[in-house]
Amino acid sequence: MVALVTLQEAKDHLRIDDNAGDSDLTLKINAGSAALLSYIQGSKDSVIDADGNPIEGDALDRMKTALLVLLGYLDRNRGGEEESALQQGELPFSVTMLVYDLRRPTII
């Protein structure tokens, strides 16, 4: 599993000082990373290499920022309170606006 941010980066962003929710936050980091990499589809190779290692640069910085924003959204909406604001398969606008031009849809 590729994690675009570390647990500590996520905790710093969310201003979390304890370890009580580390396992939950780790799950969200992994799931959010997967969702964002899936969203950009054909341009994943500008963010991670073939072995799943992050490639330093602008694309990775934007993906990391988008993931931190997404983690904030997921943390605020633990029970799906804002679920009606999104359509099935959509990410929040504040997340996609950071990475939209990295998206390269692939046709199967």
Image (cartoon, rainbow, N blue to C red):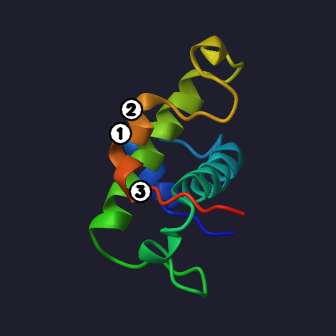
Front of the two marks 3 and 1: 1
Spatial CA span between label 3 and label 1: 11 Å
Contact, CB < 8 Å: mark 2 with mark 1? yes
The residue to which callout 3 is attached is 63
Residue 16 visible in the snapshot: no
Residues 38 and 6: in front is 38
Residue 51 visible in the snapshot: yes
Front of the two marks 2 and 1: 1
In the picture provided, is 40 more to the left or to the right than 34?
Answer: left
Looking at the picture, which amino acid does disc 2 mark?
Ser
Local crowd at mark 1 within 10 Å, few (<14), some, or many (≥20)?
Answer: few
The residue to which callout 2 is attached is 94
Residues 93 and 61: in front is 93
The residue at 56%/52% (across/down) is 39
Looking at the picture, which amino acid does disc 1 mark?
Met
- Residue 66, image x and y in percent? 41, 46
Q: Which residue extends farthest bottom? A: 51
- Residue 6, image x and y in percent? 50, 62
Residues 105 and 56: in front is 105
Spatial CA span between label 2 and label 3: 12 Å
The residue at 61%/21% (across/down) is 77
The residue to which callout 1 is attached is 97
User: What is the secondary structure assignment of the residue under circle 3?
Assistant: helix
In the picture provided, is 84 more to the left or to the right than 48?
Answer: right
Q: Quadrant of the N terminus?
A: bottom right
* Mark with earlier residue (2, 3): 3
Local crowd at mark 3 within 10 Å, few (<14), some, or many (≥20)?
Answer: many
Q: Which residue extends farthest left? A: 58
